[in-house]
Image (spheres, helix red, strand yellow):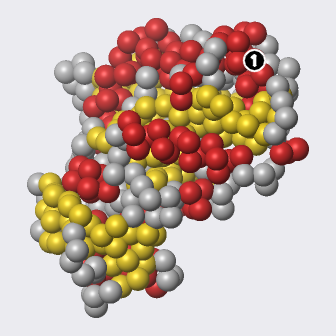
């Protein structure tokens, strides 16, 4: 039979689909019933595709609804892409292109403004109109070199308190805290977390061999008792020559206030026996190094692209965010797939914007993927013009675009999906 792609229609399709997904991600192909039971509730069959060679699934692709925070604190409906695989036996046959086109057609019809994904490999998704919109850094902190006074209370003397929490409490207070965090004006790139996310990340959904780390959870409450920060971490207990060299690995750290952020990091570097703290994925301009009297105690161990964005509805996405100043910009976008192709006029300001199709002469011309890169305010149009990725049709237009688009804090997506 020829290779064919279809949308899953029955739960009976899932075992073979899960096996193909495991092959693509280099996991054991023998997916247990417990694993399928834990993973399947998050899967919307109507948004899940399989590529088939006869009855054998050789490619996987699924999407789900997502709310993406944009500059200014507003949100956009996004088509989030996940579980993308093609089996090694069936590479270079156009399966990914066909599945992507089907998914983006459906997203456009649903009215999603953008599509998002976390790219495993950098060179794959640019040809489908995605651009890297938010990056992530990882830090390793030498606890002994921070210069902090570890004799202070865990809250750093700021009037709040830090307590351990059990998973049930995290599931109770975590969603509201995360929503407050992600809706802040400078948290562009953050996404929503559904109930399945909270169950999976607190151990309520388990299966044999899932490598769940059974983390410690700590909550920071302000002086009024309101939860303002939450951290999950695990510790590797290591001793050498009768000296402790434990490593604390931060799995998640969410802070709705600067005081909560400061207090949680002080707490983590002051844990007895912990010699090093690994931060996990953080914003590239995270406060971490400057939180300490000696910023050199926190060194960057990884820095790479993270969240990718694909424009689908240009007027809607550009009107959804706020801008650094008053101004107008005409963009000419090239999009072979047609979703974002055309010429658009943006009239923008700190309080919002309007964007419409236009016949005006363009100030800048670029592929749709470059707008995806610029949209969250993390990248510079001047830099992209120097790289030949943005064409300046009016002298000074790239600098004017930066005045509008750039943000005071860098975009950051805390979650892998």
Residue 130 at x, y percent in the picture: 51, 57
Q: Observer-nearest residue: 44 or 156?
A: 44
Q: Is residue 114 left or right of residue 306?
A: left
Name the spot of residue 326 as percent of width and height, x first.
12, 68
- Front residue of 276/120: it is 120
Residue placed at 65% from the left, 13% from the top?
11
Query: In the image, is residue 373 above or below residue 258?
Result: below
Q: Which residue is mark 1?
A: 15
Q: At x 11% / y 54%, what residue is drawn?
A: 351
**Farthest residue, direction right:** 89
Q: Is the C terminus in the top left, top right, bottom left or bottom right quadrant?
A: top right
Q: Is residue 166 left or right of residue 410?
A: right
Residue at 35% x, 17% y is: 173
At which x and y percent is residue 100?
Answer: 59, 46
* Residue 71 showing in the rendered view: no
Q: Determine which quarter of the picture holds residue 87.
A: top right
Q: Quadrant of the N terminus?
A: top right
Horizontal relation, residue 3 to residue 417: left or right: right
> Pointer 1: residues within 10 angstroms few (<14), some, or many (20+)?
some
Instruction: Tell which residue pokes out farthest to the bottom in this image.
Output: 395
Element type at mark 1? helix
When asked about the image quadrant of residue 157, the answer is top left
Q: Residue at x 16, y 57 (%)?
A: 353
């Amino acid at each position: 039979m020829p290779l064919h792609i279809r949308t899953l229609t029955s739960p009976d399709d899932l075992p073979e689909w899960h096996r193909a997904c495991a092959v693509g991600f280099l996991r054991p192909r023998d997916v247990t019933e417990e694993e399928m039971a834990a993973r399947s509730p998050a899967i919307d069959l109507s948004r899940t595709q399989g590529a088939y060679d006869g009855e054998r699934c050789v490619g996987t692709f699924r999407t789900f609804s997502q709310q993406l925070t944009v500059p200014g604190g507003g949100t956009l409906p996004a088509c989030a892409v996940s579980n993308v695989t093609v089996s090694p036996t069936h590479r270079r046959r156009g399966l990914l292109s066909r599945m992507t086109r089907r998914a983006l057609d459906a997203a456009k019809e649903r009215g999603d403004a953008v599509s998002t994904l976390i790219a495993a490999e950098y060179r794959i998704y640019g040809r489908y109109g995605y651009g890297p919109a938010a990056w992530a850094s990882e830090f390793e902190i030498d606890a002994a070199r921070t210069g902090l006074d570890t004799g202070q209370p865990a809250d750093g003397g700021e009037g709040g308190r830090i307590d351990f929490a059990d998973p049930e409490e995290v599931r109770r207070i975590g969603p509201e805290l995360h929503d407050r965090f992600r809706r802040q004006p400078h948290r562009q790139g953050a996404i929503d977390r559904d109930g399945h996310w909270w169950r999976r990340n607190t151990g309520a959904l388990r299966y044999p061999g899932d490598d769940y780390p059974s983390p410690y959870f700590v909550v920071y409450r302000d002086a009024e008792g309101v939860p303002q920060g939450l951290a999950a971490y695990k510790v590797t207990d290591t001793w050498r020559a009768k000296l402790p060299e434990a490593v604390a690995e931060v799995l998640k750290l969410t802070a709705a206030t600067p005081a909560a952020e400061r207090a949680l990091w002080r707490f983590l570097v002051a844990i007895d026996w912990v010699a090093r703290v690994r931060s996990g994925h953080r914003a590239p301009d995270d406060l971490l190094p400057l939180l300490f009297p000696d910023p050199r105690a926190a060194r960057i161990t990884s820095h790479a692209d993270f969240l990718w964005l694909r424009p689908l509805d240009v007027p809607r996405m550009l009107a959804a965010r706020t801008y650094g100043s008053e101004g107008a910009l005409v963009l000419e976008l090239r999009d072979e797939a047609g979703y974002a192709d055309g010429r658009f006029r943006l009239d923008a300001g700190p309080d919002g914007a309007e964007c419409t199709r236009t016949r005006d002469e363009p100030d800048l011309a670029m592929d749709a993927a470059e707008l995806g890169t610029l949209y969250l305010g993390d990248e510079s149009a001047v830099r992209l013009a120097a790289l030949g990725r943005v064409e300046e049709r009016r002298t000074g237009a790239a600098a004017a675009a930066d005045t509008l688009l750039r943000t005071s804090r860098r975009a950051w997506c805390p979650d892998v999906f």
